[in-house]
Image (spheres, helix red, strand yellow):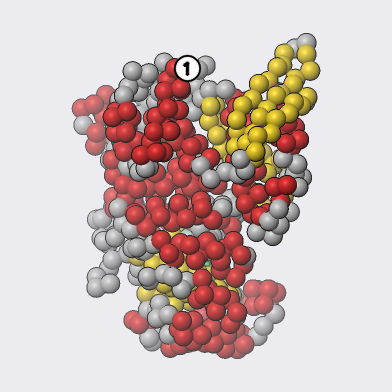
Amino acid sequence: MTDPDRLIIFDTTLRDGEQSPGASMTVSEKCRIAEMLDQMKVDVIEAGFAISSDGDFEAVREIAKICRHSVVCSLARAHDADIDRAAEALVPAERKRIHTFISTSPLHMRVKLQMEPDEVLERVVASVTRARRHTDDVEWSCEDGSRSEHDFLMRCIEAAITAGATTINIPDTVGYAHPEEFADLIRMIRNRVPNIDRAVISVHCHNDLGLAVANSLRAIEAGARQIECTVNGIGERAGNAALEEIVMAVRTRQDRLPHALGLDTRHIMSLSRQVSASTGFAVQPNKAIVGKNAFAHESGIHQDGMLKDAETYEIMRPEDIGLSRSTLVMGKLSGRHAFRKKLEELGYDIGDNALNDAFVRFKALADKKKEVFDDDIVALVDDQIAAADQHVKFVSLEVRCGSEIKPRASLALDVDGERRATEAEGDGPVDATFKAIRALVPHDAKLLLFQINAVTEGTDAQAVVTVRLEENGTAVAGMSADTDTLVASARAYLGALNKLLVKRDRTAPHALSA
Ligand code: KIV
Ligand code: ZN
């Protein structure tokens, strides 16, 4: 990279983002997100923590195979085995980075590591040295950096750079920093670490006090040139700095943040939708940049101003994040060509077969609903993408219920090509449906969440259902949309169950016949 003021965007949706409780993703979902990040030209993708599980190792390796633009990175603690495992997973990558970390705050060193500062310092040198044997691109992080003692932190940073670290990342691990204080820390590092000009300063901010983006932006003003962030701001506890907010703030406020970015912001909206669909974490309507209302103008005064000149109330153009202004409402007379164009506008790039399937489902939906809105199409296509590689597929559902009868569900599923059908009674229609699924695919997963929202307005609106299941400490989510709430519920449950089966498959290959 030649421009020293260019900002490096380091996406950790697939590593720190996945650490959000319940956000667990399958390898194929992670690959889909990595492919989109790579197309967006994000600079670095942290694909996982290779040693933490076979699933993470596989995800890092598969992502390493597919990325053409982004550097692919794996996290590693300051242990030889971690670093070697990260390197092994990264073998197929065209451009790779090992990110090694150790805690440097007094509290973490005493309680978590039970190590003296000098031992930690030795580990810093040993871990970076080992990582450099595998790649020239090594990032070192001081976990809980913002609560570390300054003199010790400066020594660690200097030693990491001397050992070969090319990026020094300062995490605000617990989201405690204040923007001005965090900027002072970055300035101190630039002033006091003698070899700092040999490394890029990075920041990694958590959002416990709602300051992750503010802290990251102040750090840029103080000299940081890499920002670590996640799509939709997902991550441990209150999450990480949101990629879309950082990127659009830099792009919109070039007067204050005159830095070039290498990525194409028009992919933001489709990435946000994909991350939401894969994790089952809905985006709040008023979320900056990607919330449903972020570009909606409800009041008459605002609408009037917008009609005269969009800049009266809009500081960004929706097109810049991949949202179309098109008012093209689809209906049952809309043809394949218009449908394809609509999908392109919405940021979907799906093959011909998938497009044909989506068109058939769109026609069926248009038969039930007078007008099909963008959000309906997004829900329909996301549903189809999620169902593509499922072992257990929905076939049909009939439910009888009412005030005078015991609810009863007749359900048919396709389990790895075998048709299975059953009937079950329950306390309500949803309970009967879920009991029927359990009868056909026995499992012990606990239902953590069952949530219904309407995709659009009106009684003919599609219901989008989210189901979160947990088994042996792994929580996964499934989402589905349909004009029939019970069908959407069954599909959402199956979406989550399929993810659990994929995860279970790794340790128990015959899980499906259980
Ligand atoms: O929050 C943190 O400290 C981290 C490090 C591993 C970078 O995620
Ligand atoms: Zn973190």
Q: Position of residue 100 (x, y in %)?
A: 52, 75
Q: Residue at x 54, y 56 (%)?
A: 27
Query: Is residue 150 visible from the viewing direction of this image?
Result: no
Quick check: 13 above or below 114? above
Quick check: 155 above or below 227? below
Badge 1 residue CB within 8 Å of ligand 2: no
Count all numbered tags in the image, as a single digit. 1
Q: Position of residue 503 (x, y in %)?
A: 64, 54
On the rendered structure, is 244 left or right of 508? left
Q: Which quadrant would the N terminus be assigned to in this image?
A: bottom left
Q: Residue at x 42, y 20 (%)?
A: 366
Report the residue marked by disc 1.
368
Name, please, the residue furthest toward the left: 308
Q: Position of residue 17 (x, y in %)?
A: 53, 56
On the rendered structure, is 508 left or right of 483? right
Q: Nearer the viewer, residue 463 or 321?
A: 463
Q: Residue at x 51, y 71 (%)?
A: 89
Helix, strand or loop status at disc 1: helix
- Give the quarter of the image for residue 409: top right
Quick check: 302 above or below 71? above
Q: Nearer the viewer, residue 506 or 379?
A: 506
Quick check: 173 above or below 335? below
Q: Nearer the viewer, residue 124 or 176?
A: 124
* Dot 1 crowding, Cα within 10 Å, few <14, some 14–19, many 20+: some
Q: Nearer the viewer, residue 21 or 69?
A: 69
Q: Quadrant of ligand 1?
A: bottom right
Q: Residue at x 41, y 47 (%)?
A: 271
Query: Is residue 463 visible from the viewing direction of this image?
Result: yes
Amino acid type indicated by mark 1: Lys
- Give the quarter of the image for residue 45: bottom left
